[in-house]
Image (spheres, grey):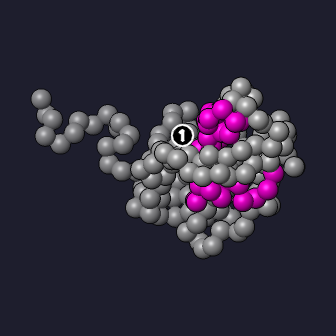
């Protein structure tokens, strides 16, 4: 495994499953069971984990971890983020497909080219992806990662274009109809 910047988080162990050492993994892959398709994974400290997917249940992957044989050992792994070297992942299939890790650090600007900040995180909370943008003033803004809000993603160029939804940022003006 190379440096941390070249790693992509494929999932996080969210807890034990049963008494035989299996774990529940929140997968960040397009198909949840693919979290086990790339071979050995590593944590932030570089420790290796060999996992075998056993099934899916309630939005998580059920997996066994080599060397983990009971619930107590599985409980210790709770919160462990599982990474893979970016070079081991296939290239995105088309220009509208991105790895979340490729978006982190991109400059954010509006259509006029005015800088708005930097992408600091990408999340999928189940209702669609959202991105966190840290503005030059240090404030954090979360916007939907949709074609309407983010019409341009230029990973090679190091930027995205965002059209802020009206009312998302408090600009000090009163809303229409709220003159009182």
Judge whether residue 130 can be spotted in this image: no
Q: Position of residue 56 (x, y in %)?
A: 56, 51
Q: Position of residue 77 (x, y in %)?
A: 72, 32
Magenta region: 12-40
Residue 57 left/right relative to 149: right
Residue 23 left/right relative to 41: left
Q: Residue at x 49, y 45 (%)?
A: 58
Judge whether residue 30 can be spotted in this image: yes
Secondary structure at badge 1 equals loop
Residue 67 left/right relative to 34: right
Vertical relation: 108 (above or below) 152: above
The residue that disc 1 covers is 135
32 within the magenta span: yes
Q: Residue at x 62, y 46 (%)?
A: 62
Q: 120 or 81: which is nearer to us?
A: 81
Q: Position of residue 114 (x, y in %)?
A: 51, 52
Most extreme residue toward the right is: 2
22 within the magenta span: yes
Q: Position of residue 123 (x, y in %)?
A: 53, 46
């Amino acid at each position: 495994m190379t440096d941390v910047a070249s790693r992509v988080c494929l999932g996080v162990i969210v807890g034990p499953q049963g008494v035989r050492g299996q774990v529940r993994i929140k997968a960040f892959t397009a198909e949840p069971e693919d979290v086990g398709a790339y071979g050995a994974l590593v944590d932030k400290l570089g420790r290796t984990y060999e996992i075998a997917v056993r099934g899916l249940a309630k939005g998580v992957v059920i997996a066994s971890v080599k060397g983990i044989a009971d619930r107590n050992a599985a409980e210790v792994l709770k919160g462990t983020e599982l990474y893979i070297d970016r070079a081991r992942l296939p290239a995105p299939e088309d220009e509208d497909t991105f790895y979340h890790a490729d978006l982190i650090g991109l400059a954010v600007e509006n259509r006029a080219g005015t800088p708005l900040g930097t992408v600091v995180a990408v999340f999928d909370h189940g209702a669609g992806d959202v991105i966190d943008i840290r503005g030059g003033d240090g404030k954090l803004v979360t916007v939907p990662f949709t074609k309407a809000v983010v019409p341009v993603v230029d990973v090679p160029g190091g930027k995205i274009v965002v059209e802020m939804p009206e009312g998302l940022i408090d600009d000090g003006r009163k809303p229409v109809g709220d003159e009182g």
